[in-house]
Image: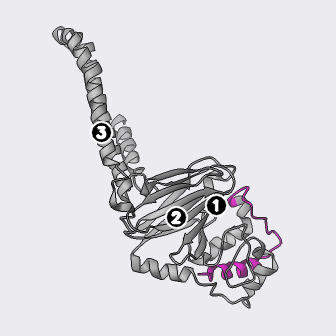
Amino acid sequence: MRRSGLLIAVVWLLISCAGEQSAFSGYSEGAARVAQLTWIMVGGAGLILLLVVVLTAVALFGPLSWRRLLRGEGVVVGLGIVFPVVVLTVLLIYGFVLLRLEASPQFAGDPLRIEVVGEQWWWRVIYHHPDGSTTESANELRFPLGRSVELVLTTADVIHSFWLPAYGGKVDMIPGRTNYLRFLPTHPGVTRGQCAEYCGGAHALMAFYAVVMPVDEYEVWSASERTNAAVAESDPGAQMFLANGCGGCHRVRGTQAQGVIGPDLTHVGSRLSLGAGILSADHQGFRDWLARHQRIKPENRMPAYDILNDAELNSLAAYLVKLE
């Protein structure tokens, strides 16, 4: 039973080192270097621990001649002073060489510039385009594969912490300050990030997704993202959206909804999630959020809409799904 328990524990630990929010993914050059250094430190620490256990066993149960040898001044000085100094010095130098960010070519050229603003409890995402224009999204980041990215990190209220482990980033967002995170995506796919600094009641439900796409797919997506909403205001769901005051907080480009308090919903139907990584962006997800968002994400800033009946909820959800 002890062996089975140990095996289960090891397997569980190995499982925790994978997944869409794993710090060991190494999906950028910097993150890969950090993961490599981490494994070296973990492996080295394991070997040193094994050495300490063996020496302890020898000191307790070994032959008398071995125990006398361990008491010698040479062993104490060698293993207690010289060995730690040499190992830590080598590790320090290796770490500096491995993580030499300033010498890395990954930040050369013109990076994709994205501003991320932490708010209670969601992420405002603003893409800065080469022509000087901007496009706003929420709770989702998209990058072209192989192009350097610069994230400009600020906060609109309290301290947040932007953590995107697959790309080696955990940077605090401090009121009144602007911090930066730069990396070069090297793997396509979807990963997940999280706020890593307690920021209030719904802190644990403040996640986001990051999607790395081939360059041609990203260009198509970016061009589509810059267009206005594809659904006409004559749509019943659009009329209900405006009639219930949703446009006072949310913006849908190309319509009368021009609110700036909440997330921009122009293309919300094409996103991977709702509520900052909580629900899927499909009809059921939208309907659940509209009907019981205060139970799904307590203390979020959106007012409760208990006045809507099932038909109205379905109409609104259908409209939001069509905003792709």
Q: Nearer the viewer, mark 2 or mark 3?
A: 3
Classify mark 1: helix, strand or loop: strand
Residue 283: in magenta span:
no
Q: Is residue 82 left or right of residue 300?
A: left
Q: Which residues are magenta?
A: 296-324
Mark 2: amino acid:
Tyr
Q: Is residue 129 rendered to the left or right of residue 229? A: left
Which amino acid lies under the numbered mark 1 shown in the image of this protein? Trp
Front one among 306 and 200: 200
- Residues under labels 3 and 1: Cα distance? 40 Å
Q: Which residue is mark 2?
A: 209
Helix, strand or loop at label 3? It is: helix
The residue carrying pointer 2 sits among few (fewer than 14), some (14 to 19) or many (20 or more) residues within 10 Å by Cα, namely: many
Local crowd at mark 3 within 10 Å, few (<14), some, or many (≥20)? few
* Image position, residue 289 (x, y; %): 68, 68
Residue named by callout 1: 122
Q: Amino acid at mark 3?
A: Ile
Q: Which mark is residue 93?
A: 3
